[in-house]
Image: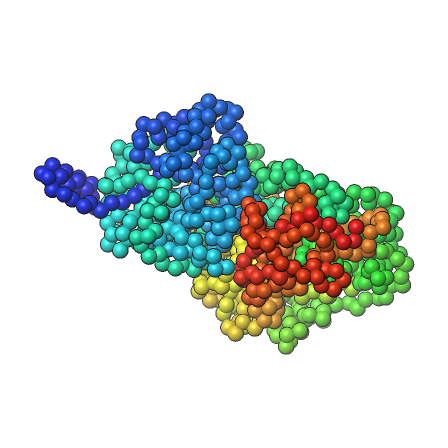
Amino acid sequence: MSTSKSFKRNLLLSILLLGGWTINAQQAWFVDGYHGGVYGHYPEWQARFMVDKLTEIPDWKISLEIEPETWDSVSIHDAKNFQDLQEFYATTGRFGRIEFVNPTWAQPYCYNISGESIIRQFRYGIDKIKEYFPQATFTTYSVEEPCFTSSLPQILKGFNYQYAVLRNPNTCWGGYTTGFGKDLVNWIGPDGTTLLSVPRYACEELSETNTFATASANQSDQFIEACYANGIKHPVGMCFQDAGWKFGPWLGNAEKQYYKPTAFTTWTEYIEMVKDKVKPTDWNFSVEDVKPGLVWGAQVLQKLAQEIRVSENRLIIAEKLASLNCIYSGEMWPAADFAEAWRTLMLSQHHDCWIVPYNGRPGSTWADNVTRWTGSSNRIADEKIHKMFADTKNANTNKIRIFNTLGTTRTDLAQVTLPKNKKMENIGIVDPKGNPVPFQISANTQGNNVLYWEATVPGMGYATYTLKKIKHKPSEKAAKRTTTGEVKIETDYYIASISPAQGGTITSLVDKKNGNKELIEKGKALNNLRGYFYREEKFYESTDKGAEVTIREDGPLFTRILIKNQIAGNNYRQLVTFHKRNPRIDFELHIDWKGQPGIGAYDQSKNYKAEERVKAFYNDSYKLHLQFPLKGVGDKLFKNAPFDVCESKLDNTIYSSWDSIKHNVILNWVDVENQTKDYGVALFSDHTTSYLQTSELPLGLTVQYVGKALWGRNYKLHCPTHIRYALLPHAGNWEEAQIEAASTAWNEPFIANFVNPGKEPAEHSLLECPDRNLHVSSVNMEGKDMLVRFYNTSSQKEQEVYWNCSTDQIEQVDLYGNKISSVKSKKGKNGQVITKLVLPQFGFQTLRLSNIKSKKY
């Protein structure tokens, strides 16, 4: 509706009211508030401004999405005004004027980090807010950025949230949610948890004039009238302003024309007002209903995603090992150290790290800070891990202890760096029972010898192996060069051919364990690099040039092939590892860049306009990517997400404009399967990025984009590119093949080092999960109590856990640690305690074991 029409309508209403007519005007509502924080944007005058405006305008109400750590800073630097805000909240604000909606420590996007990280973001954030606002309640989750993922209903309900809002109308640069439904929906998570929510309405269109907003951000006449026309009985708009904006009420700005009558409300007040007046629609919200449009493949994003992943893995491992140390050695739980490690990791997960990585002063950009923050987290985590080997500096010991942080017994590669004086001639390695095990010695990049061996270690426990004099048996070689120059590798799992003439790509891969299947499309090549270099106006790929292919190592445990080649004049190398006793194939890709090539759909350096919907960085098919032209799979694609595995409904993942964003994100893995879901191939990535799936290519992995992107910034190359990825062919579907467990094992490798053992047993397990699809998500201590969180990816709801410890009682607790119910247990063989869990697929559950003691100590 035009401004003149709006004026005429309001004038008519005024005349009718003055004439004594009674008009039941259709009411609308609006949720205002502030977003930001000490790390994003929060001026010192903000507290005073909010109190003054709320006092001046009694009808105004606000939602707060402020980084909790902000209050530490403001309480010192703006103490008097902050005290006034605290008093206002305590006496007036909490009674419907101010609502805390997103307490997460750093307002993360959620879909791009681990489920455990999301839980910590809420837990630490809520505790910090309550430190300054003891009466604070957390009832409705709402955000300014697209900080959503499919499993949030389960997480939010674990913190006693009742409602959520599935829209981010005024900050859609980094994405938005699917438009769906009317007034309210039942947001159904992957585990079946339901949360009453306000959706981005099906009729809530994306803006036609910009690429950051939806129709509900400004409460226009057109938006409200479209709502009524589409059967929405109680339309509500929303805008969380950036802290530092001086408008006061967003709709009070004289420049803004908005629908009247509109009343300000908080989200909880609104939902509780309308929930009995409308029937919510059930919505099985998928992670693909989160549509994130970040600059996938940009090196700055790639690097910070890798750093965050390393810290996430390292910190979870450290917590598990520190818990074992508390139980075995009586060590005090280092709560303050872990809180600081999580603080810096959580800051590195801030949404601004991902969407504006270059913002900030030189040397102190978001990306620079991620390196510092994760480095701090890693130092603390490594200190706790090394405590397990505190008395192990004696290089003359022949004992090596391996810790397994997974909940199931596991056979995998263990490794230690050998001391310079350690001689390995005629030396082998034996397991705790004295049986020799296969081993292999390899040189690392620092020139040190690394001992690898096949170890079997019980769940959440350790095993001690011993170096011993043994006669070495020569191992069969797996790799050989054929008369045509190809390198052929044959293990118990595969027969593979790597062709120097085809750029060092894998031209044949036969799965021996599953019917001798050829996995590569005829005439195609696996691990082929392909991308469009727009300055040369040409696609380049690995197969353009012949490669140097070398058999780097070939021992009893693994065979490594080194491939050296060029792409568009840039040297690169790939290291491919075929394991003799594991079906996973590991890859490392390293590219040494020459200058700043332009890689992407086209050069946008001179004509980038933020408001234009079509942008070069959206289209993955032109970015440098790895290709996996797999044969007989690709009809189905599954991908993991935080506490979820999603079956994709996308025909392909390619898009080129802001209004057609697709969820093309690989968190840890994607799995392509055949139509009958009895065979598939999983792809693991060492960082969150995007994957490709098209009618021509069942699977690809984004490697590099170089050019203009968000905010008109030039996303450059700053260093060599180095990524790790892996392939895992398998029979059955992803669940039957235990792909989530395989991914967790890839991310939580064995921790091993030399030890001087005391009288403790040679091996020990704290707990054992018979089903590998039941995962130990985290382990923590509170005094003498142990808290263990389990996550179930099995369709089997009833699960058992075997405890090799004693405890006074076992309780199920919520994410605050409050008791939900007692958990019954029974005695098993060898004095084990057996607990039965009832968990839906993709459900998690936290157990508290009170006064826990190891049975062996």
Q: Quadrant of residue 490?
A: bottom right
Q: Quadrant of residue 827?
A: bottom right
Q: Tell me where residue 644 appears, x and y as whole percent.
A: 52, 58
* Residue 731 sits above or below residue 247 on the image: below
Side of 650 where 829 appears, left or right: right
Q: Residue at x 48, y 50 (%)?
A: 157
How many labels, in total?
Answer: 0
Q: Tell me where residue 672 appears, x and y as whole percent.
A: 54, 66
Q: Residue at x 82, y 43 (%)?
A: 391
Residue 245 visible? The answer is yes
Q: Tell me where residue 37 appears, x and y as whole percent.
A: 47, 34
Side of 269 where 423 appears, left or right: right
Q: Tell me where residue 654 appears, x and y as whole percent.
A: 45, 58
Q: Nearer the viewer, residue 201 or 212?
A: 201
Q: Residue at x 46, y 27 (%)?
A: 82
Q: Nearer the viewer, residue 611 or 231?
A: 231
Q: Nearer the viewer, residue 739 or 841?
A: 841
Which residue is outermost to the bottom? 515
Residue 370 visible? The answer is no
Side of 818 where 391 appears, left or right: right
The colour scheme used to paint the residues is: rainbow
Q: Nearer the viewer, residue 321 or 454?
A: 321
Q: Residue at x 38, y 36 (%)?
A: 95
* Residue 455 sits above or below residue 609 on the image: below
Which residue is outermost to the left? 19
